[in-house]
Structure formats: structure tokens, C-alpha cells
Image (spheres, rainbow, N blue to C red):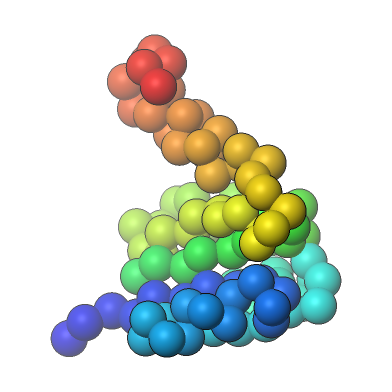
Amino acid sequence: MLSKIAVIGSRDCILGFKGLGISIFSAKDGEEASRTLAALANDDYAAIFITEDFAEGVEEMLKDLRERPLPTVTFIPAGAKGTRGLGMERLRNSVRKAVGADIL
């Protein structure tokens, strides 16, 4: 069985993902995004993308999810606002932890 992919963010930023067959979940604030992430983490989702504007709101939930193999949670830029570099920073920290050096 194929695992599902989801994206959480403000409706205008994530609507385009629906055309790719990705499940979309709109949120109004970080608290709602965190509740949605908690529900999706207990479903059959392998990858969950969250727009960077909700990063702070889901940080506590991410601490719990880091110990689990799935789902993988990744931040994506929030539309025209551009990136804050949170996704790359998380990747850099994971690589640094795995190899013991910053190779990115």
C-alpha cells in the first residue's frame, strides 16, 4: 500500500498541491496546524509538508515526532513571502548529527 502525503498551511498557499494528488489541510494559526499535524501523524502519512509560517506553532509536536521513523515532516516556503530557511536548517542539523560535521 502506498503511503499518503499531506501539506498543512494557509489555504491560498497550499491549494495548488491538491492538483498533484496531495492531501491538503488548511490552518488559520500555529495551534490549528499543530492539532492537524498530531492527527495526521497517527494516520498513514509518510510525508507531511508544513508552510514555514506555522513552524513555531508545531515545534513541540515535532519534538515528539523526531523519535519516530514516519512521518517525515518538512517545512516549505509560504508562497510569495519567500523562504526563511527553516527546512534547510533542519536538514543541516540532521546531517550534522548523523556525520558529526557540517557538510552542507
The residue under the point 56% across, 55% down is: 76
Q: Is residue 67 left or right of residue 103?
A: right
Give the image location of residue 35, x and y in percent. 69, 77
| Residue 98 appears in view | yes
Give the image location of residue 55, x and y in percent. 70, 54
The quadrant holding residue 68 is bottom left
The residue under the point 42% across, 16% down is: 102
Q: Against 21, is 87 above or below? A: above
Q: Residue furthest top?
A: 101
Q: Is residue 5 left or right of residue 63?
A: left
The quadrant holding residue 100 is top left
Give the image location of residue 17, x and y in percent. 48, 78
Q: Against 42, is 71 above or below? A: above
Give the image location of residue 81, x and y in percent. 73, 53
Q: Nearer the viewer, residue 23 or 67?
A: 23
The quadrant holding residue 31 is bottom right
Q: Against 2, is 68 above or below? A: above
Q: Is residue 83 left or right of residue 23?
A: right
Q: Quarter of the image for the C terminus: give it.
A: top left
The residue under the point 45% across, 52% down is: 67
